[in-house]
C-alpha cells in the first residue's frame, strides 16, 4: 500500500466526509458474532459479552432470544433484563422507550410475522442502531443471502431465511466463532469450507472498515495483490472444489489465482482428457494457467511457487502417496499449504 496525501479535497468531498462522520457518531455501534455451523457457541459468546458489559456498568437488555436455549446460555440470560417480543418480533417501541446502551439480539435472520413493522429482524436492528443504541447480535454464515448458493453446494441444504451481506458490511466489529475442539458437528471437509466462508466474510468487513477510515481521512491508497494462490492440478484432483476455494480466496483478498500442472507425457488418453477439462475450467474461473516441467515434482513446484511469490498452495493428495506432499510441507517456509483429498480418496 502506497498512501498519497497530496490531493486536497474539494468542498463537496469535505461536506460528504463531515456528514458521514456525523451519521457514524449518531448511530449505535454494531457487533456481530459470525458462526459457520450450528452449536459453535455464537449465542453463548454474545450473551456472555452482554453479561460482562453489565458487570462493567453498562445498561444492557435482551430484545430477542431463542425460545429454547442451552443451559449455559439460560444461566446468563437469567441475569439480564429482557424486553419481551410480540409474536416473535422485537417490540421496537418498547426498546426505544427503554433506550438502553446495549441491546442483545439473537437469531438475526428471523422473519417477522405478517403485519410487523419490518418484514425481517435485521431491519429492526437497523432502526435500533439509528436510535443511537449499540447492538450485539449473532448469525451463521448459511443465513447470508449472497453465500447461500455456496453453502448449499457444500451441505445440500438452504436456509429459509436470510440477511443481505451488505448488513455485515455495516458492522463496527465482527468476530468469527470457532467450534470448541471437542464438538463434532458433521463432515470435517464441509465444516472447513463453511469456516473459510466465514473467515473471508469477516476479512472483507475489516477491509471495508480500513477503506472507510482512509476515505474519511482523505488518504488515497493503491493496493497490490495481497494473496497469490496457486492451485496444483492432476488428473485425480478434486479440481472443482480446489478451484472454487482458490477463486473465493483470490476475490476476497483481491489477490491472484494461479493454476499449475506438471507435464506428464506418459498420461493415458482418459487422464489427459480429464486434465484438459480441469485446465479449461481453471481458465473459465479466471485462473492463470502454467505448465511445469521438471524431474522432481516437489522441487519443481517449490521453485515455481517461490518465483511467483505464492502465499497459499492448494494441493491434492491420496493416502497412498504422501512422500512428495510431506516434502512440500516441510519445505514450505514462505507459504501455506492446504491439502484436498483426491476424489477417489474421500
Image: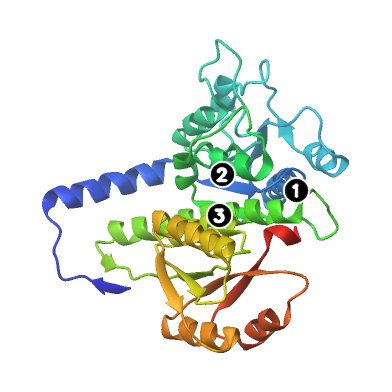
How crowded is the residue under tag 1: few (<14 C-alpha within 10 Å), some, or many (20+)? Answer: some
Between disc 3 and disc 1, whose residue precedes?
Answer: 1
Q: Which residue is mark 1?
A: 41
How crowded is the residue under tag 2: few (<14 C-alpha within 10 Å), some, or many (20+)? Answer: some
Residue at horizontal 56 percent and vertical 24 percent from the top: 97
Q: Where in the figure is residue 190, as x and y percent of width and height?
A: 69, 51
Residue that extends furthest to the front in the rendered view of this protein: 269
Q: Where in the figure is residue 290, as x and y percent of width and height?
A: 42, 73
Residue at horizontal 33 percent and vertical 49 percent from the top: 21
Q: Quadrant of residue 121?
A: top right
Real-space CA distance between mark 1 and mark 2, rounded to the nearest whole angstrom: 23 Å
Above or below for 213 versus 145:
below
Between disc 2 and disc 3, whose residue precedes?
Answer: 2
Q: Is residue 80 left or right of residue 292?
A: right
Q: Where in the figure is residue 336, as x and y percent of width and height?
A: 58, 76
Q: Quadrant of residue 285?
A: bottom left
Q: Which residue is mark 3?
A: 240
Q: Where in the figure is residue 66, as x and y percent of width and height?
A: 74, 31
Q: Which residue is mark 2?
A: 150
Q: Which mark is residue 81?
A: none
- For the residues carrying marks 1 and 2, which lies nearer the camera in this image? 2
238 or 312, nearer to the observer: 238
Q: Quadrant of residue 39?
A: top right
Amino acid at each position: 500500500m502506497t498512501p498519497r496525501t497530496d490531493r486536497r479535497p474539494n468542498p463537496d468531498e469535505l461536506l460528504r466526509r463531515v456528514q458521514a462522520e456525523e451519521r457514524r457518531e449518531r448511530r449505535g455501534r454494531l457487533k456481530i458474532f459470525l458462526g459457520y455451523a450450528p452449536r459453535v457457541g455464537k449465542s453463548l459468546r454474545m450473551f456472555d459479552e452482554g453479561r460482562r458489559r453489565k458487570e462493567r456498568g453498562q445498561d444492557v437488555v435482551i430484545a430477542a432470544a431463542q425460545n429454547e436455549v442451552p443451559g449455559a446460555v439460560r444461566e446468563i440470560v437469567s441475569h439480564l433484563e429482557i424486553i419481551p417480543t410480540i409474536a416473535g418480533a422485537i417490540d421496537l417501541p418498547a426498546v426505544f422507550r427503554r433506550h438502553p446502551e446495549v441491546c442483545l439480539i439473537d437469531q438475526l435472520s428471523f422473519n417477522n410475522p405478517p403485519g410487523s413493522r419490518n418484514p425481517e429482524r435485521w431491519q429492526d436492528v437497523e432502526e435500533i442502531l439509528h436510535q443511537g443504541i449499540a447492538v450485539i447480535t449473532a448469525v451463521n454464515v448459511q443465513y447470508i443471502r449472497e453465500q447461500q448458493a455456496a453453502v448449499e453446494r457444500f451441505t445440500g441444504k438452504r436456509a429459509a431465511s436470510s440477511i443481505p451481506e451488505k448488513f455485515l458490511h455495516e458492522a463496527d466489529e465482527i468476530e468469527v466463532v470457532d467450534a470448541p475442539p471437542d464438538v463434532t458437528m458433521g463432515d470435517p471437509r464441509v465444516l472447513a469450507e463453511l469456516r473459510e466462508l466465514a473467515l473471508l466474510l469477516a476479512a472483507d468487513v475489516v477491509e471495508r472498515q480500513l477503506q472507510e477510515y482512509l476515505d474519511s481521512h482523505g488518504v488515497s491508497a493503491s493496493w497490490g495483490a495481497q494473496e497469490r494462490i496457486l492451485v496444483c492440478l492432476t488428473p485425480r484432483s478434486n479440481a472443482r472444489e480446489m478451484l472454487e476455494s482458490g477463486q473465493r480466496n483470490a476475490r476476497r483478498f483481491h489477490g491472484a489465482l494461479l493454476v499449475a500442472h506438471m507435464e506428464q507425457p506418459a498420461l493415458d488418453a482418459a487422464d489427459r482428457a480429464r486434465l484438459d477439462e480441469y485446465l479449461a475450467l481453471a481458465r473459465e474461473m479466471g485462473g492463470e494457467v502454467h505448465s511445469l516441467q521438471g524431474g522432481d515434482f516437489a522441487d519443481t513446484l517449490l521453485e515455481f511457487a517461490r518465483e511467483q511469490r505464492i502465499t497459499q498452495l492448494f494441493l491434492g493428495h491420496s493416502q497412498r502417496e504422501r512422500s512428495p506432499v510431506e516434502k512440500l510441507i516441510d519445505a514450505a517456509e514462505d507459504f501455506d499449504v492446504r491439502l484436498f483429498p483426491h476424489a477417489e480418496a474421500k
